[in-house]
Every structure is written in C-alpha cells, then in structure tokens.
Image (tube, helix red, strand yellow):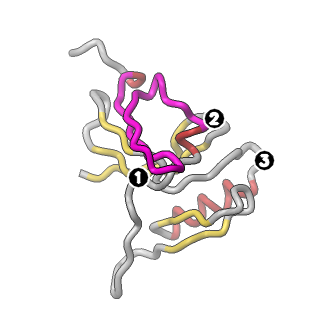
C-alpha cells in the first residue's frame, strides 16, 4: 500500500476563463474551483431515460445544469439552505489512489469544501 491518501488525490477543473487546472485535493483552491466551468458537458437526446436540464439558482444568479430528478431535488434543497455558499455543476474530476473509478459528477458544498451528491462512472 502506498503512503498516499485522500489529500494526494488528483483533481482537475476549468476556471471561469477556461484555464485547465490540475492539482491535488490538499492544495485545491476551493473558492476558485467552486466557481469553475463544468468539467464535462451534460448532454440530452430524444428518448433518453433520465431527466436533465438547467436550474436557475437564487444563490448564484446563474443556471446550474443537472442530469436527474435527484440532482434537481438536491439543487432545490441546497439553494434554500443558509449554509450553502455556492452551487456548481460538474465542478471537477478526480482520480487517485483512494478512488476505483473516475468521479465526473459532483455537486460541491463550498461552505464545507466537500463534494455532495456524487456518483462515479467507469
């Protein structure tokens, strides 16, 4: 087993200006990452089985993309929660020794600096 842990996990995000940033969890600028551009595009097509769209956030005064009704529900709850400082769609991807799959889909609670409502894709 290597001596690497969660703080050594590699994180990649795109800044508001489109700059591609690769860093680690331990050195990540949470404020900058929470206001980043989505790391991947949310696609929709005729006949798809999930419900995706854009949610107008009171907190951020911008649209936040979602890929399922569950994500939309989490956005609704987070938007009215006074502890939430910012909402971001697909804010980063991560890969590291503690992860078995690449995690592309995370909602981030900037107030706590931790991802919420994440799922992994293989």
Identity of the residue drawn at 51% across and 50% down: 17
Residue at the spot of label 3: 82
Name the residue tied to disc 1.
Answer: 39
* Mark 2 element type: loop
**Residue 47 locus on image (x, y percent):** 33, 86
The numbered disc on residue 112 is: 2
Q: Position of residue 10 (x, y in %)?
A: 34, 31
Q: Quadrant of residue 25?
A: top left
Badge 2: few (under 14), some or many (20 or more) residues near its Cα, within 10 Å?
Answer: few
Check residue 89 for magenta coloring. Answer: no
Residue 92, percent from left and from top: 43, 45
Q: Residue at x 38, y 77 (%)?
A: 44
Q: Are marks 1 and 3 in contact (CB under 8 Å)?
A: no
- Compute the Cα span from label 2 to label 1: 21 Å
Residues rendered magenta in the picture: 8-31
Q: CA distance from mark 1 to mark 3?
A: 26 Å
| Chain-order first, disc 3 or disc 2 | 3
Residue 50: percent from left, percent from top? 40, 75
């Amino acid at each position: 087993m290597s001596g690497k842990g969660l703080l050594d996990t590699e994180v990649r995000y795109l800044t508001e200006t489109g700059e591609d940033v690769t860093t680690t969890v331990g050195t990540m600028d949470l404020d900058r990452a929470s206001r980043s551009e989505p790391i991947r595009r949310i696609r929709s097509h005729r006949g798809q089985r999930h419900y995706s769209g854009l949610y107008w956030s009171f907190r951020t005064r911008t649209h936040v993309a979602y890929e399922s009704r569950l994500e939309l529900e989490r956005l609704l709850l987070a938007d009215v929660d006074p502890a939430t400082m910012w909402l971001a769609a697909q804010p980063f991807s991560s890969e590291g020794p503690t992860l078995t799959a690449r995690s592309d889909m995370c909602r981030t609670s900037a107030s706590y600096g931790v991802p919420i409502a994440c799922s992994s894709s293989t």
